[in-house]
C-alpha cells in the first residue's frame, strides 16, 4: 500500500513538547529576573528611581513575546 501523504511526517511526541514548553517557562522567569536586576543596578548607579519598574516591564513583554513565539514554533 502506498502512503497517501507525499511528505514525510514526523509527529512530535507530547512529552517532547511538554519539555520544550517547560524550558521556555524557565527561560521566561530568567528573563524577567535579570531584567529586574538590571533595572535595580541602573537605579543604583544612575540615581534614578523608576528604571527598575520600566526595565522589569520591558523584560516581561520580551519574555511573553518569546514564549508565544516558541509555543507557535513547537505547535507547528
Image: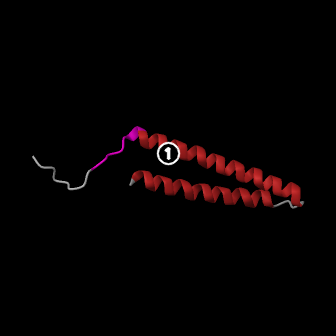
Left or right of 70 on screen, residue 36: right
Tell whether position 50 is magenta: no
The residue that appears at 54% across and 47% down in the rendered structure is 24
Horizontal placement of 60 versus 50: left or right?
Answer: left
Coloration mode: secondary structure
Q: Position of residue 67 (x, y in %)?
A: 54, 53
The residue drawn where x is 42% and y is 40% is 16
Assign the C terminus to one quadrant of the image: bottom left
Quadrant in the rendering for residue 49: bottom right
Q: Secondary structure at mark 1?
A: helix
Percent of width and height locating residue 17: 43, 43
Measuring from the top left, give residue 21's x and y in whole percent.
49, 45
Which stretch did the figure color magenta? 9-15
Q: Nearest the camera: 52 or 7? A: 7
Q: Residue, x 81% and y 61% (percent of image)?
A: 50
The image quadrant of residue 63 is: bottom right
User: Which residue does the numbered mark 1 point to in the structure image?
Assistant: 21
Q: Nearer the viewer, residue 38 or 50?
A: 38
The residue furthest left is: 1
Q: Residue at x 82, y 53 (%)?
A: 41
In this rendering, is residue 46 above or below 31? Answer: below
* Main secondary structure type of the part rendered in magenta: loop
In this rendering, the answer to whether 46 lies above or below 15 is below
Amino acid at each position: 500500500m502506498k502512503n497517501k501523504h507525499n511528505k514525510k511526517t514526523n509527529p512530535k511526541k507530547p512529552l517532547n513538547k511538554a519539555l520544550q514548553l517547560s524550558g521556555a517557562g524557565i527561560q521566561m522567569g530568567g528573563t524577567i529576573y535579570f531584567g529586574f536586576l538590571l533595572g535595580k543596578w541602573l537605579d543604583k548607579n544612575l540615581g534614578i528611581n523608576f528604571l527598575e519598574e520600566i526595565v522589569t516591564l520591558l523584560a516581561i513583554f520580551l519574555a511573553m513575546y518569546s514564549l508565544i513565539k516558541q509555543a507557535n514554533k513547537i505547535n507547528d
